[in-house]
Structures are given as C-alpha cells and as structure tokens.
Amino acid sequence: MKIFVTGGAGYIGSICVEEMLNQGHEIVVFDNLTEGHRLAVDPRAKLIEGELREPASIAGALRAEKPDAVMHFAANALVGESMTNPSKYFLNNVYGGVNLLDGMVAAGVKKLVFSSTCATFGMPEEVPIHEGLPQRPINPYGESKLMFEKVLRWYDELHALRSVSLRYFNAAGASEQFGEDHRIETHLIPNVLKVALGQKPHVEIFGTDYPTPDGTCIRDYIHIIDLAQAHILALGREESAFYNLGTGGGNSVAEVVEVCRRVTGHEIPVVAKSRRPGDPPRLIAASQKIKKELGWEPRFQSLDKIIENAWAWHQRHPGGYGD
Ligand code: UFG
C-alpha cells in the first residue's frame, strides 16, 4: 500500500515508517519538522515539508500523492505545556487534524490510523483501562485528542472515512536506526538514560507518596516496535474502531530507574521531588480488544529489553539527531 504519514519525522512516526518500509509499503512522510527531525526520516521514504494548519498545503499533498491510507502522528504531545498554552494544542491537534480529514475527503482517501492516547481517560475509575470506561481528560492535550476522536466518528458517518484510533500508553524503546529525541524532553526513560550518559547529574522522581507499592507512579511501557505492528494491523481493518494499546503490565518509576541501572551499569542518582500536576498514580491498558479483533500480540513484554534497545540507540546518538 501507499501510506501517507503525518509526523513521520517524529519518534513514533519514524519507527512506524521504518517498519512499514520493511514490510514493503511505499511511504510519503508529511512533516513540518518543528518537533520531528530530517534525519529521523528513513531514506527510503519521500519527505514532504508541509503544514497541517494550512489547508492548501495538506490538501495539495494528498491530491498529488493519492495514497491508499493515512497514518496521523503529527501533534503536540506535552501535557505540561498544554496546561499553559492550550490554544497550541487545539489548533495543531484539532484544527490541523480537521484540515487533514478535509484533504482526505477531497482526494478520495478513505482510511486513517490515528495516534490517540490514554490521556483521553484522565484519572481512570478503574485499572486496567478498557475501552468502555468514560473518557474525561484532565488536560488540554488529552482533550484535544478526544475531540479529534469525536470528529472522526462524524467523518465516518458523513464521509465514509474509516478510521482506527490507537490510544497509546507509554511508548518506549528504539529500533536499530531510530529513537527518542524530543527537543524538550519530559519523558522518564530518555531522562534517566541522559543521567547514565553523564548529561544530567540525577533523575528527579516526581512523587514518592502515591498509593502504589513503592510510592511512585506506575505506567504501561510498550515497545515502539510492538506499537508499530499494531498500526500495520490497523490498516487491514475495514470498519472504524478504537483500541487501547499497552502491554497490560505496569512498572513504577523506581523500577524503571532500577532496570536502567542494571542495563547501563551506571549508578543513576535520584532526587525525590513533589508530584507532577495531573499524573494519575496507575495507568495500565486492558489490551484484550485489540488482541481479539486485530490479532495483535506484543513481542517485547520485558522492560529490560525495551530499555536495552533505548540505551543502545542513545549510546550511538548521545546528541540525539543533532539538530
Ligand atoms: N517522571 C519522573 N521523572 C521524570 C519524568 C517523568 O518521575 O524526569 C514520572 C512521571 O511523573 C510519570 C512517569 O514518570 O509518573 C512517566 O512519565 P512520562 O512523562 O514518561 O509519561 P506520562 O505517563 O506522563 O505519559 C503521558 C501519557 C501519554 C502521553 C504523554 C505525553 O500517558 O499518553 O504523557 O507526553 F502521550
């Protein structure tokens, strides 16, 4: 298939592009390179530098390329920033997304896989989080992704545009070639690995008094390659659907640091800090639905493997992509 990938120069997009190329698909990446990196685009893919907030830019690219399907990764994804600059999130993640859908309708492209997030659930009523739980985001980032999920429902009904929304839990790890390099790094694992690389003196642990066994937050870390496989399976689905996407297992912040110590052989000092606003204590996916309906199975269930792969990439790219 010919797949048009928005945000294909970002962390998750770049590795999905690589996996799809490995499976023989033809790929066009559409990215404005504000968050993404030119060097993160697999050389086998075509790169179009374009802007989702300009309707003519995205519509023109879709009309020219006529892809079979679109994967939509392009978004702003920092929870904290969304609390101080909500308009950026609603403009880029909702308005930009609607421009993409209108461009698809005009070009006759009828299939989309969308990067959604467990942040659409806010503080979940129960864990593991299944698709039937209410979605009540607690920040503009999660709200913007939920708004777009709702927009998708109407484009399905009114334009027969079929979509699969994948609500990721915590994407982590790396492929041989591509890895995680955010210009502002807030995520746990890359920040811990920066300490192991000697680029930061210590890791800050945000909250040690949560109602969890060791007092630190628990997250469901899913290997980026498993996440990419879920996208490829989603391409084969005919009807629109929503899936929660995690391994169903959970690791605390303290456990992540401990595994990083073991994998890197570095001491990794930690400093306990107060809680980060908006962090739920436990986020774990119920992933039965995607396993049953798409036949998805995670290959990397161990956090050790995820961190080994991330560490190998960071050692090879201590300055990230260097831009
Ligand atoms: N944490 C630390 N120290 C750090 C960084 C993070 O203790 O230096 C803690 C956080 O407080 C949290 C856990 O590590 O308890 C994981 O934090 P991340 O920032 O790595 O990821 P989040 O769980 O906050 O991820 C959330 C949503 C995702 C969403 C992402 C957006 O779960 O769906 O924010 O960046 F995509």
Image (cartoon, grey):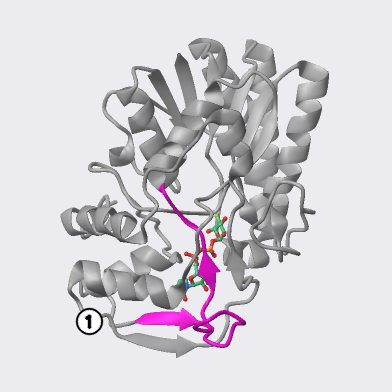
The type of residue carrying mark 1 is Glu
Q: Position of 103 compared to 307: left or right? A: right
Position of residue 140 relative to residue 147, above or below, is below
Across and down, in percent, residue 70 comes to 55, 24
Q: Is residue 20 above or below residue 77?
A: above
Residue at (38, 31) in percent of width and height: 17
Q: Quadrant of residue 138?
A: bottom right
In reply to whether residue 149 is colored magenta, the answer given is no
**In the displayed structure, would residue 137 be above or below residue 131?**
below
Q: Is residue 157 left or right of residue 184?
A: right
Q: Which residue is mark 1?
A: 267
Look at 63% across and 61% down and name the residue there: 82
Q: Please name the residue shown 57% across and 79% down the image.
A: 212
Which of the pair 248/114 is nearer the observer?
248
Q: Which of the two residues, 194 or 233, is positioned nearer the viewer here? A: 233
Which residues are drawn in magenta? Answer: 203-223
